[in-house]
Image (cartoon, rainbow, N blue to C red):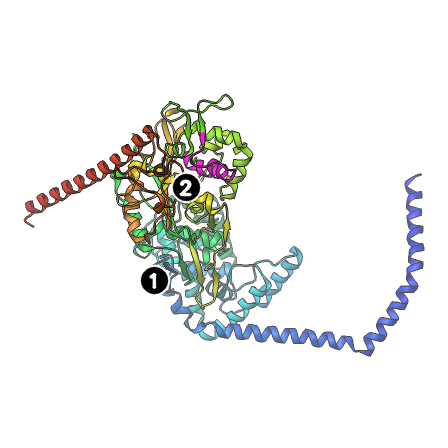
Amino acid sequence: MDFREIFARIKTGLKNFWQWLKPYLVRFHHWRKRIWKKYQINKVILLLMLVVVLVSSVYLYVLAKSVKVSTLESSMKEVTIFYDKDGDEAGALSGKGTYTSLTEMSPYIVDAVIATEDRSFYEHNGYNLKGIARALLSTVKAGSIQGGGSTITQQLAKNAFLTQDQKLSRKAKELFMAIEIEKHYSKDQILEMYLNNSYFGNGVWGVQDAARKYYGVNANEVSLGQAASLIGMLKGPNLYNPIDDPQAANNRRDTVLSVMVETQKISEEQAAQEQTVDLSSLLYDTYEAKASEYRYPYYFDAVLAEAVDKYNLDASDLNKGYRIYTALDQNQQTAMQNTYLQDHLFPGNAPDGQMVQSGSVAMNPKTGGVTALVGGRGDYVFQGFNYATNTQRSPGSVMKPISVYTAALEKGYTPASILEDQPQDYYQVNNYDGTYSGQVPMYQAVAQSLNAPAVWLLHQMGEETGFKKTGQFGVKLAQSDNYPGLALGGLERGVSPWTMASAYTVFANQGKQPESHLITKIVDATGAVLVDNTKVETIAVTTSEVANSMTSMLLGVFSNGTGISAQPYGYTVAGKTGTQEASFDSSKTSDQWIVGYTPNIVIATWLGFEITDENHYLEGSSSTGVGPLFKAEAEAILPYVENEAFTVADAYATGGEVLAPAEVVTDNAGSSENSGSSGWQDTLNDIGETAKEVGGQIKDGFDAVTDGIGNWWDSINGQ
């Protein structure tokens, strides 16, 4: 059967089908005409359309009237304010820009913005019918709402009052608000507000600060080419600025210059001359942010990132006079920041001068609110890399309670269960000191951070069990992490202090994990609530019994284990230390961790170099590396945390039995009658108590020496 025959059969079939269907269609058509005419459907549809247009117009008119257009100019000078957990003002976003009058801007800037953004700016009443028609045509062709067609007044309305969403409703609001703005302000005032409220990338708003940021001059001193490049950034400030992409900036400047020639603002010779200049050769930054208002930089950076990433605010909108309410505790934040200023708490720099980096997060385990956060050391960069939230590092042994011991407790193991402590033939694992006990109770394996028992226990349960449990804590894993090394924190991607703080809230909060967050509420300049996060979701990761059993063992980390030297003086904390070996030398370390908690706070701290190699590594373990830092910041933060006792006793005081503190009965010699401890366990307890006593004496002696030196110095200065 050839193609012609197939086509002829299809044609015949369709013809027969049409002959069958046609009578039914004719009947339906006559019936529709009768109904349509009887009920005057055409008039009904037309009336409904008119009602929709009328209601929409009234709504948009009322909306435009409700916006405080009359105070727009003064509001341009307002900034976004951050509030702490108590609703007190904590700081402001120092990115509003230096407000500059139009007369203090170069004529090149004015000519460039008119030529590229709105050629009929001085003729229209806030909207341009031709521009709207072009935008509608583009929308029809693309099949979705397209940008473009907006006048400078409409863009000002969008920047000042609306979001950056490409929606028809937003475009309609923008149009009505633009008309309202034109009623209150002159063209020069509108242009002035627009140029002062536009975002130019790299944390800079307003043309004056942009001129300072990129070229080190005032807005009235820029050259023609510099003015063209600044206005060119308005289309995409992160794409066309000369710091991030000089070539794209050059191309965009050339486009603006061509448009200025087309509109007869400049000559072709002027444009050609400016196009020969590489903008990267003109870069000179003299911009100074108002740092005093941005007093908690890493915390505020994380807040802005959460506003953008979680709540979809546009980065260029963040200076619109928002009121951002957070979980910040200013006392805790100040204490943490001051700790990070004490260089003696950190290991020394590398031979090339590179500084050891660190990040810390303090979190309320009952609410998930981050109360304090520091994301680095050294020179701060606005919205730069944040080691508290962005870093992805191997967690080492701080992963053991999450990836191994929680699942084991859920399967019926107890803190007193005996684990195997010896090398394994299916996975190479060594304890930190290279020795093995053969057998060891679980609570001691946890406190002493023994590697072999953790790997053995994970293998006994099945790696898949630990893998699934770790994911329930909110730790993102790769499929390759489903192996025995998961017990030791060997991950493909790694974790951040934020992630570990959130995970340990499970143990501090009776097995429940609240959603970790910084922002509790965002209110815009009109008073509308954009975000309400005051009711936070909480998920049950494990049972309260398992969480209490884990806490009883983690108390032993600081009383008798690897965290004994990091125990904050005068406070009882539970937690875990972690050390990750360097890949090139097992005697060196790449990452050091301590996570400590009370019933009302979790503090997670990481320490390491940005990149670990043969010239950039840490010595020793967490107890000697990150330990002094954690101890100092915990001692500074805990006075501002509600003092609440743990509901379980230290497993070292009970021999692994999970008891309330009141159930632990001690004899006159101070040893526990419940513990059933053997002689070696009593010796370990005695060593722990002695170490704590010695630590306290050393602290007292250090304080006395410090006071003596201070008094001697004062006497020299005659004070």
Q: Badge 1: few (under 14), some or many (20 or more) residues near its Cα, within 10 Å?
A: few
- Percent across and percent down for residue 377 are 32, 42
Which image quadrant: the N terminus? top right
The magenta-colored residue range is 397-418
Amino acid bearing label 2: Val
Element under disc 1: loop
Residue 233 is a magenta residue: no
* Residue 123 visible from this viewpoint: no
Question: Which residue lies under the disc numbered 2?
Answer: 658
* Residue 491 visible from this viewpoint: yes
Residue 400 is a magenta residue: yes
- Percent across and percent down for residue 91 are 34, 58
Amino acid bearing label 1: Asp
Residue 347 figure quarter: top left
Question: Which residue lies under the disc numbered 1?
Answer: 88
Q: Residue at left 49%, top 43%?
A: 473
Residue 128 figure quarter: bottom right
Residue 58 figure quarter: bottom right
- Percent across and percent down for residue 198 are 44, 59
Label of residue 456 in the image: none
